[in-house]
Image (cartoon, rainbow, N blue to C red):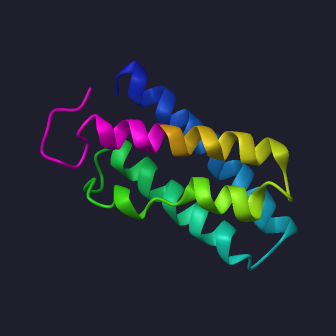
Amino acid sequence: MDSVLQKRFELFAEALGLCNGLLLEFPGRQALLSIREQLLYLMAVVRDERAADRFGEITIGVLTAREVEPLSEVAAGVFYKVSAEARDMQSQGKGDGLEYP
């Protein structure tokens, strides 16, 4: 894994840890469960274990604004970074048959 992908993976892993922590505090919160699934998907894409064909379904930023900000500013900040990385991955062609760094 090159350094860009490694940094992305580490960010996604950090976000997953924060999400899991919030789920311990707020079990069953649908927004957090959705964010967790999206993070697992993004991590699998970075590891080339999943096709990158679902970027249009990534709603971490919206869910963060609506649901996470009131719960944790720290987690919200990390989730916004994840959302930006997902947009970057999509704009770089991941999932469109184009080469990806």
> Exactly how many numbered labels are in the figure?
0
Q: Nearer the viewer, residue 32 or 1?
A: 32
Q: Residue at x 58, y 36 (%)?
A: 11
Q: Residue at x 63, y 71 (%)?
A: 33
Indicate whether 5 appears above or below 59. above
Report the side of 78 relative to 8 (left or right): right
Q: Nearer the viewer, residue 81 or 2?
A: 81
Q: Position of residue 96 (x, y in %)?
A: 17, 48
Q: Which picture quadrant has residue 81?
A: top right
Q: Residue at x 44, y 44 (%)?
A: 86
Report the side of 39 relative to 29 (left or right): left
Q: Position of residue 38 (x, y in %)?
A: 50, 60
Residue reaching furthest to the left: 97
Indicate whether 101 appears above or below 32. above
* Magenta span includes 93: yes
Q: Position of residue 3 (x, y in %)?
A: 41, 19
Q: Residue at x 64, y 46 (%)?
A: 79
Chain part drawn in magenta? 85-101
Report the side of 59 relative to 31 (left or right): left
Q: Nearer the viewer, residue 84 or 100?
A: 84
In the rendered image, the quadrant that contains the N terminus is top left
* Magenta span includes 15: no
Report the side of 75 relative to 63 (left or right): right
In the rendered image, the quadrant that contains the C terminus is top left
Q: Position of residue 35 (x, y in %)?
A: 59, 62
